[in-house]
Structures are given as C-alpha cells and as structure tokens.
Image (cartoon, rainbow, N blue to C red):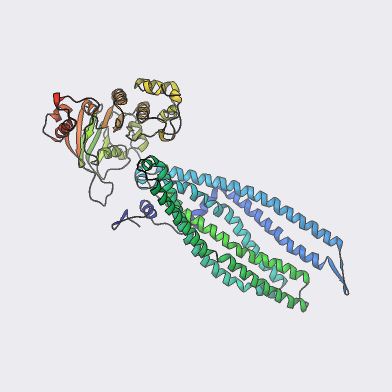
Amino acid sequence: MADLVRGQSALSDIELEEALAKQSLNRGMFARLLPLLRPIRHLVTATILIEIVLVACVFLRPWLVKVAIDKGLVRHGAAWTVDAHVILLVGAAMTLAWIARFALAGVSQYLSGSAAIRLLADLRIRVFAHVQSLSVGYFDRTKAGRIISRADRDVDALEPLLIQGPPEFLSALLRCTVAGVLLWLISPVLLASVAGVVPVLVAATIAFKRISQRNWATVAENRSRFTAHLVDSVSGVRVLKQNVREETNLDRYRQLLHEFNHALIRGSIRSNWFAPFTAVLSTAGMAVLLLTGARSLAMNTITLGQIAESLLYVFLFLGPLQDLSDLFERYANGTACAQRIFLLLDTKPDVLDPVYPEPLDRAHGNVAFNHVVFAYDSRSGIPVIDHLDLQIPAGEVLAIVGPTGHGKSTLVQLLTRFYDVTGGSVTLDGHDVRHLAQATLRHHVGVVLQDNVLFSGSILDNLRLASPDASDQALISAARDLGADEVLETLPHGYHTNVGPLGTHLSHGQRQLVCLVRAYVANPVVLVLDEATSAVDVQTERRIQRALRVLCKGRTAIIIAHRLTTIRDADRIAVIRHGRLVELGSHASLTGQAGIYADLYRAYQENAGLLIGGVAPEATELVT
C-alpha cells in the first residue's frame, strides 16, 4: 500500500488513489463484475438464448450444403444430373436460415442495447452516489478529471465487456464445440487433422491475454491523465491566461497525449501479432484437412458433400478461436477500467455518521472547541490545530484573526465535520459533533465561504438549494430582508437571471450576496463566515455589512475576516497563531493591551498611514 509520501518523491495519481482507498489495485475483476449483471439477468439470458438459436442457424447451412451436393447432384454412371426439387428445398431452407439469422440478430442487438443502457446508467448512479458520499479530504487530494474519467470513459468501456462479451463468448464456445463434435461424427481423422493447431492456439491466447491486460491498463491510466489535465485547464483558464501560460499548458497536454498514443501504439504492436498468427494456424489446419479429406475421398470413406460440409465446420471450429483476439482485447480494456472504478468504489469516507446518532431537533448555538488537536497528515507530526480551547456562547458574534495558514479556516472544517479532530472534541450544545448525523449538524451550521459557489440556473434556483419547498415570493422576501434586492433586482432578468457556470455571469460581490441570502434562507443556528467580505469594492462591502448585521442577529456567528469593520463589530475577537488561541477579548480590550492583536492593528495603521487622528476608515483590512 502506497503512503501519501514515498521517500522524497510525490506519488503517481494511481498510487495516490490506492493510498486513499487503503488497498492496491485489484487485478482479478471477474468476481466483482459478475454481480453487475444481476439486475439485467433476464435480458442477458434472453440474448444468450437467441445466440444459441443463431448458432443453430449457422450450423444448419453446412448440413444444407452437404445435402445439396450429395442429394441434389445424382450420378448415373459417368453422367451427373441435378435434382431440382432437392436444390429448391435446400435453397428455400437456406433463405429461411438467413432470414431467421438477420431477424434474431436484430432482436439480440435490441436486447443487448437495452441491457447496456440499464447497466451503465445504474453503474453511473452508483459511482455518482459514492462520490457524493466521500469526505471533503478525498476531493482535496484527488484531481477532478480523474473522478470524471471514472464515471464517464471507464464506465463506457465496460459495455463491450459485460453486454456484448458474454453472448459472443458463448457463441464462440458453442461454435467451436459443436463444430468439433460434428467433425468427429463425420470422420475422426478429419477432426484429428485440425485439432493439432489447438494447443498452439491456446498457448498463444494465454500469452496474448497477459500482454493485452498490461497494455490496456497503461492506456487507461494515460487516458485518465490527459482527461484530468483537460478538466484542470478548463477550471483554471483565467489563471493560465493571466500568466500567459497557454503554450506551456498546451505543451503539457501534447506530452500527455503523446504518452497516451505511445502506449496505445506500443500496445498494438505487442498484441497485433495474434490475429495474423491465428490466421496462419487456421490456414495450416485447412490445408491438412484438405489433404486428409482428399485421401478419404479416394478411399471412398467419405462423400464429396461431407468434405464440403467439413470445410465449413473447420471455419466454424477455428473461426471462434480467431475471434478470441477481439474478445480478449475487450476483456483487457474493460477490466483495466473496472479496476479503477472499483478502486474508487472501495474508497471509504474518512468521516462517517455514528451508528446511533444523537438527536438534536432544536439547537441553541453553544459551540465549544475542547482541547482540539488536528493534523491533515497524521504522519507529519505537526498539528494545524494544537490543543485549542475556545467557548462560544449562543448568540455571540466571534471574529477570528490570525496569519494565513495558522488554522482559522480549519476550525470551520472541524465544526462542520468536513474533517474529524485528531484529539479533543468539538461540541454543539454539548453534543460532540462526531455523535451527530452529518445532515443534522449541517442543518444547524451554515457556512458562507470566500470562494462562493453557485450552480448553473437562475438566482432563485440557487436560493432554493437551501429550502427546496420555498416559494419564489418567500425567497425574494429573504433577499429584501438582507437588502440584497438593491443589487439583484437590477440584473437583466432580476431573480430569474441565469448565473452561468459556477456563477460566472455575476460579479464577485453579486455572487456573495446570493450566498448570504441562501444562508439566510437556510436559517442555521450557527453561521460561519469565512472571509465572506473579501475581494469586493467598498460600496458592495457596505451592502454586505448591512446584510451581515441582519444575518447574524439572533444566532451564533463565527467570522473569519480581515475587514476592520467586521472585526470591530464582533462581541469578541480570537487571535489564532500556530493553531493555538493566543488572545481573546473585545476590540477595545485587545487594542488596549500590548499583545499580538494590538501589534497587528498598530502595524496596519502605520503601513496605511492612518495613525493621524487615530481613525481608520471602514473599508480597510487588517493585514495578518
């Protein structure tokens, strides 16, 4: 099992996935794939039965050829005559056999297509549901493109294996077996003449299977890499353009595609020998059968019709063995993708609900961090939060300040159980949050982040995420309560304005107002604002400040911010440094002390040139 760090080098993507799943890639997939067919077993069974009938139609033709030759051509001394009645009957039977084959093949395609749609849809839903159940830590460490590749390309690759594969494999097996039996019944010598190629073909098939599996595993991994890079590039297109890195990024994508194509070509070179090799073996077998058949015909132990029938049986005997090339290639590709899908499905959430969660129907909002210790990587030995104690009474507005990377936002993630504490506890109204169902906890704790996220749809659609049953009027009233109507109602289509992908049609301040209204609609008992007023202009910030006063009224509020107005308005200010609580008190009491907060505040005023008069404007930031 790969650790998250291997010596001094970073893990590959697939090694990281193995580490997160806490198990290695499983090479044996048959036992995992078979249960996927259970919901569609009746469709698969029907397809297999049709394939059996199709095989019967195929074997009817050689027999009809024999009848046409042996019964339709009648020898009278040195002359031959044609029995038209027999030829017509054989022709009619041959036509019916072809018609039946085409009709049944159409039905088989329809059934297998229906089965494929159901199976792939069920598997996609299963993968999607599992991805949603995973903890935030998984997404922090896994590229989005690799997850998309699992749910899209890898799932698609299973269709030829699971739906088309079993009927075609059964058909090949039946054709080979029945053809061998019929050849034996015609002449054991004829069967023996072609059976000699079988051991060689079996050995070649085993070698091909092993080579092909390794090749397709490499191809699938390289495909995931360039897909992940594509998703990352789309997500970070603004950063790439701002830093003029398009060419460099294109070169990286070109390199990943080159590695994918190289693996594809190398795999083809290493495995494309199988089809020509089986063709040579089949030709050799046919040549031996013709020599043996000619000798038997000369000895009058076999008829001309039986020789013709036997030649067709040889095609049916060796043909399926040649088809194994395509079948094993599908198997190798499908299993390589299945290994990655099941590696994702085997990944367990780090944060789990308790078996018997404690009830919390009505919360008051008392929050406590009790001797909390937390590290993102338990092996590093350096905690992000180090034995922190902090009590927040219900209804209090607490501002948290401190240098970047010293644990402020981590406290939010521990309170909402995106991560679980390493030591100590976080409680809500005396309940350890680990003893509550995550849905219950997050119903009582609302969060507005600096990187606000909106989903494609209208503003009302995004507000309705917090309250699915709310009417349009109720959502609009909430926006007006916060004063967001001054901005949102001036948009081209008001509350019906489409926000675009991730809210890109709105400005940062407009998106933030929508997120604040959404939090207000959710009506949490505890509200967490993580840098919610950053990166906005002065006018928008004042609107947000007014909205915050309404939003925080009557509830516990934890505000992580640099804005001086927000900090000064808080009931208390907590200063976090190196994951520890180093100061706690009101703005007035902390500035009156010769402590860290006073130094930070004084340093800001000096840097901003605001010491004159001792007055700082409202739209300012505390540089920490």
Q: Establish if 40 lies above or below 497.
A: below
**x and y percentages locating residue 103 in the rendered image:** 70, 50
Residue 208 visible in the displayed image: yes
How many numbered badges does the structure rendering display?
Answer: 0
Q: Is residue 288 left or right of residue 436?
A: right
Quarter holding the N terminus?
Answer: bottom left
**x and y percentages locating residue 110 in the rendered image:** 63, 47
**x and y percentages locating residue 287 in the rendered image:** 68, 73
- Residue pictured at 63% horizontal, 52% vertical: 47
Quarter holding the C terminus?
Answer: top left
Residue 356 position by quadrant: top left
**x and y percentages locating residue 8 in the rendered image:** 28, 57
Residue 620 position by quadrant: top left
Q: Establish if 172 lies above or below 404.
A: below
- Residue pictured at 55% horizontal, 45% vertical: 118
Q: Is residue 469 left or right of residue 177?
A: left
Camera-nearest residue between 571 and 430: 571
Q: Establish if 453 lies above or below 251.
A: above
- Residue pictured at 65% horizontal, 55% vertical: 51
Q: Is residue 440 left or right of residue 605?
A: right
Residue 554 visible in the displayed image: no
Residue 483 position by quadrant: top left
Camera-nearest residue between 581 and 543: 543
Camera-nearest residue between 280 and 340: 280
